[in-house]
Image (cartoon, helix red, strand yellow):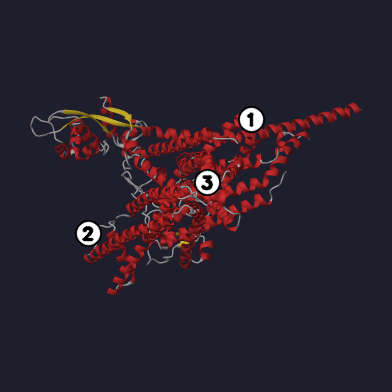
């Protein structure tokens, strides 16, 4: 009898224990699942961007023999003469000669439309480079237009019925002839890195935006670093504990949590409308980002200052240094690695920021590379946003490629920060 | 002379005076029987501060006042001709833009061109004047400073006082920024509420600001009922929280309770990378990967999803917030003392029971405050919704439809050229004010919750 109860109790307890253990396992699985899903999403995000960006790194070209009909003198062309040449007609003539059967005006136009608008520049550059005598034939690789480029890369399916793709059957037949003759090639798309923005996807590059980002970051750094460090030193080392400093501290922690777009509104109302800082310039963008970044720098600097042990301050004070000398000679140099790390991380955040910059007009179509902080400029995230909004299909790959460049840029900054932390980190 | 070159000149003068006072104080020290009170470089810095500081201050004052004074003169000149105030404003802006070269002279009348030339002349004169004044001031302050140099002069104290004052100014920038935000929002908001009543704004269900484009149109005040924006923001925020709170919380539990140091050293940076991805990238991801995927899956099971559905924006925003919640909650759970865990485990609790019954209750206030901060971020997040959510203000709670948010509307109203005092622009500032107040409120509550209900363990 007692045995029976004992066994029943035991089975019950065992069942209970098993239930508890399986619940433990379940809970553990949930936790692992959460982390894995976060990592999986990160992987999906990165891989989908890399996959869509790949086509942007190559461009298709067609090799054509170009010839200038020129003065019948036996000499080289001068630069002035080359500048006067109508390159568009030179390029078109080469195509017309290649397809002599194309005669209708409409067809001729779509034939030339296969080439990028940048083809004329490529032709001119080739002639400038090689010393060409009149009558010489120069073989030049001319970039194809974005739609044809997509066909070559297989992104636009040639087997689809004609009304479902943007490229006509006729154009594809021309392309096939060129391909069969081995004239169509793919090469690395240097244009992506050396050109400014353009309406034509195959000519659009990120150089202008990248330089704009650098100028903007320069302004942000120049404004936020000194202000941030000085404010942090004051609050951490010198300030008396009173209402005023309390208020400043509350302010700083609140600023760090204000939505970025509100800083954009501030920039629009105060910097542009009140102080007349030029719109769309790295100056105004950098100032707005500096206001967003300096709370981060203050917080990082204070942490770095706090980690310097008090014995160092006491020793310096003991041998007669003034409070400011204690800071500038001892505390600040020791806290510098921490300050730099925090600053770089803050700047990396600012470099990826878009919303406040849209408010101050840094989302603009700007072809030229900005040369100073008051020139019209755009930044990389804003460029990404503009390209992402562009309906032309070839911009999709360009956008992903620009994102990739931005991510590499940010990764590089963070890597520097981690390196500095590892190299100079000191445990007291 | 441009202001930049003037400042460079002043800096050069300061450098020279630094060198000169160094030389002078050394000579004095050699001749004097007493010891120097301050090191020679403090004397140098003292003079240099005077030589650069005073003229630079004057120049900065000139930069801000000169345009105002010149404008007033111009308005007075134009006013004498007997023009309407509106015309005067237009002419003034024309004159100024011709004078600074942003408007080609070909576009304006002869009179305006004359005025522009005159304006430029008087600007040049004032610029010459300030250059002369600054240089004279530099010499005077040099003479003043150099006379004070003496062996027992407390130069270090003066320089340190100055340094301290500059540091205080730097900390005040934080206050000024907040003040700037509040001021710039408040003024425009008040102006906006003059044309659109507060109650209409907060309780109206129609949002179509584009009606206000033309002043002579019927109903030209537009429809500024912000309720659809609030519900849209709320819908997307709720979706984001549904995604991010469970994943973020479980990830935090894993990191702080289950993970070995090795796994932790891999998983934590991975989550940090997720936090470092710029929001414009998330927006792109939402628009080109998640939204089409959801639409196709929805279509395959017979659901009709808008291509700018709230669901896509909400899910991706949730992903963005995961690392935010996980790192904050991770910190909170790590702060729970080890003795509590040991006690629970010693009583025979399994690890998950310890977590559910001991650690989570202890960390609860901190977790609530983390979630509140996350909500405040979700409400203020802009790029994801601008790129993935819609523009049309639908009043709906259906996540498959397209909704719009406060931040999307701010961007839509302000991007591009706009007159600064149209209700359309002002509405953006009113929305910004609302956003600022709501996020500020959430942050304050979060801070209060974590302070008020935090368990103290010693």
In front here: A104 or A175?
A175
Q: Is residue A329 visible?
A: yes
- Separation of marks 2 and 3 at Cα, in angstroms: 60 Å
**Quadrant in the picture for the N terminus of chain A:** top right
The one nearer the camera, B149 or A263, is B149
Q: Position of residue A124 (x, y in %)?
A: 21, 35
In space, the residues marked 1 and 2 are separated at their CA atoms by 74 Å
> Quick one: which residue is furthest to the left in this view?
A73
**Picture residue at 47% right of the left edge, 39% below the top:** B289
State which mark lies toward you, 2 or 3: 3
- Disc 1 is placed on an element classified as loop
**Discs 1, 2 touching: Cβ within 8 Å:** no
Which residue in the structure is indicated by mark 2?
B106
Residue B217 left/right relative to B376: left
Label 3 secondary element: helix
Picture residue at 27% right of the left edge, 24% below the top? A182
- Disc 2 on helix, strand or loop? helix
Q: Which residue is mark 1?
A: B260
Contact (CB < 8 A) between labels 3 and 1? no
Tell whether B90 sits left or right of A359. Answer: left
Q: Where is residue B159? Give x, y as percent.
A: 48, 52
Report in which chain the residue with disc 2 lies: B
Does label 3 lie on the same chain as label 2?
no
The answer, for residue B301, to whether it is visible in the render is no
Residue A399, placed above or below residue B432 = above
Depth check: give the residue in front, B392 or B249.
B249
Residue hosting label 3: A325
Left or right, B419 with reference to B238: left
Residues at marks 3 and 1, CA–CA distance in whole angstroms: 45 Å
């Amino acid at each position: 009898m007692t045995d029976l109860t004992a066994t029943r109790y035991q089975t019950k307890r065992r069942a209970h224990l098993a239930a508890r253990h399986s619940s433990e396992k379940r809970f553990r699985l949930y936790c692992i699942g959460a982390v894995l899903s976060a990592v999986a999403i990160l992987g999906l995000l990165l891989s989908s961007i890399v996959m869509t960006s790949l086509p942007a790194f190559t461009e298709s070209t067609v090799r054509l023999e170009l010839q200038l009909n020129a003065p019948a003198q036996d000499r080289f062309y001068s630069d002035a003469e080359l500048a006067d040449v109508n390159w568009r007609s030179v390029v078109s003539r080469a195509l017309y000669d290649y397809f002599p059967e194309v005669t209708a005006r409409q067809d001729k136009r779509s034939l030339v439309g296969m080439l990028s608008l940048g083809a004329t520049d490529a032709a001119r550059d080739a002639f400038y480079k090689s010393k060409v005598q009149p009558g010489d034939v120069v073989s030049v690789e001319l970039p194809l237009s974005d739609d044809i480029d997509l066909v070559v890369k297989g992104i636009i399916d040639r087997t689809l019925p004609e009304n479902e793709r943007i490229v006509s059957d006729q154009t594809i037949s021309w392309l096939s002839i060129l391909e069969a003759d081995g004239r169509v090639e793919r090469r690395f798309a240097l244009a992506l890195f050396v050109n400014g923005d353009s309406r034509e996807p195959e000519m659009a590059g990120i150089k202008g935006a990248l330089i704009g980002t650098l100028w903007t970051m320069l302004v942000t750094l120049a404004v936020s670093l000194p202000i941030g460090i000085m404010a942090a030193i004051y609050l951490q080392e010198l300030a008396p504990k009173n209402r005023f400093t309390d208020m400043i501290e509350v302010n700083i922690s609140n600023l760090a949590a204000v939505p970025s777009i509100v800083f954009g509104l501030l920039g629009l109302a105060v910097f542009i409308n009140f102080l007349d800082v030029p719109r769309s310039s790295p100056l105004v963008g950098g100032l707005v980002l500096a206001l967003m970044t300096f709370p981060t720098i203050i917080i990082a600097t204070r942490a770095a200052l706090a980690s310097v042990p008090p014995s160092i301050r006491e020793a310096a004070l003991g041998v007669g240094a003034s409070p400011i000398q204690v800071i500038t000679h001892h505390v600040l140099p020791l806290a510098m690695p921490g300050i730099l790390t925090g600053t770089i991380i803050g700047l990396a955040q600012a470099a990826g920021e878009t919303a406040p910059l849209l408010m101050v007009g840094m989302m603009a179509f700007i072809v030229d590379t900005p040369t100073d902080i008051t020139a019209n400029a755009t930044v990389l995230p804003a460029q990404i946003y503009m390209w992402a909004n562009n309906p032309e299909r070839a911009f999709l790959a360009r956008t992903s490629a620009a994102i990739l460049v931005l991510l590499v840029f940010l990764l590089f900054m963070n890597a520097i920060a981690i390196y500095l932390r590892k190299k100079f980190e000191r445990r007291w | 002379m441009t202001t930049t070159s003037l400042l460079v000149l002043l800096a050069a003068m300061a450098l020279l005076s630094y060198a000169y006072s160094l030389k002078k104080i050394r000579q004095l020290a050699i001749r004097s029987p007493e010891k120097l009170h301050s090191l020679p470089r403090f004397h140098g810095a003292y003079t240099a501060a005077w030589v650069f500081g005073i003229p630079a201050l004057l120049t900065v004052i000139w930069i801000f006042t000169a345009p105002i004074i010149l404008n007033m003169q111009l308005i007075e000149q134009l006013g004498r001709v007997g023009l309407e105030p509106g015309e005067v404003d237009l002419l003034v802006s024309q004159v100024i833009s011709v004078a600074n070269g942003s408007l080609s002279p070909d576009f304006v009348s002869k009179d305006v061109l004359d005025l522009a030339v005159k304006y430029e002349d008087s600007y040049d004169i004032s610029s010459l004047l300030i250059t002369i004044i600054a240089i004279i001031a530099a010499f005077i302050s040099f003479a003043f400073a150099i006379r004070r140099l003496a062996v027992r002069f407390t130069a270090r104290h003066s320089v340190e006082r100055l340094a301290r004052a500059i540091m205080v100014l730097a900390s005040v920038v934080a206050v000024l920024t907040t003040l700037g935000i509040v001021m710039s929002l408040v003024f425009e908001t008040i102006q906006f509420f003059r044309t659109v009543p507060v109650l209409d704004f907060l309780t109206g269900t129609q949002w179509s600001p584009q009606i206000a484009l033309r002043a002579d149109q019927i109903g030209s005040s537009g429809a500024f009922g912000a309720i659809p924006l609030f519900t849209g923001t709320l819908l997307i925020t709720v979706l984001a929280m549904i995604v991010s709170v469970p994943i973020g919380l479980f990830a935090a539990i894993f990191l702080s309770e289950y993970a070995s140091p090795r796994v932790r050293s891999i998983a934590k940076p991975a989550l940090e990378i997720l936090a470092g991805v710029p929001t414009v990238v998330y927006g792109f991801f939402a628009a080109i990967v998640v939204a089409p995927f959801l639409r196709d899956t929805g279509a395959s099971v017979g659901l009709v999803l808008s291509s700018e559905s709230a669901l896509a924006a909400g899910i991706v925003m949730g992903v963005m917030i995961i690392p935010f919640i996980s790192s904050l909650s991770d910190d909170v759970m790590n702060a729970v003392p080890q003795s509590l865990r040991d006690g629970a485990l010693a009583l025979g609790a399994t690890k998950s029971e310890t977590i559910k019954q001991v650690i989570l209750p202890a960390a609860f206030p901190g977790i609530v405050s983390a979630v509140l901060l996350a909500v405040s971020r979700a409400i203020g997040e802009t790029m994801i919704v601008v790129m993935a959510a819609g523009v049309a203000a639908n009043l709906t709670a259906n996540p498959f439809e397209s909704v719009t948010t406060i931040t999307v509307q701010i961007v839509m109203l302000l991007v591009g050229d706009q007159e600064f005092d149209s209700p359309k622009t002002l509405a953006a500032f009113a929305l910004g004010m609302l956003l600022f107040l709501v996020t500020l409120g959430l942050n304050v509550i979060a801070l209060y919750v974590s302070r008020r209900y935090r368990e103290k363990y010693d």
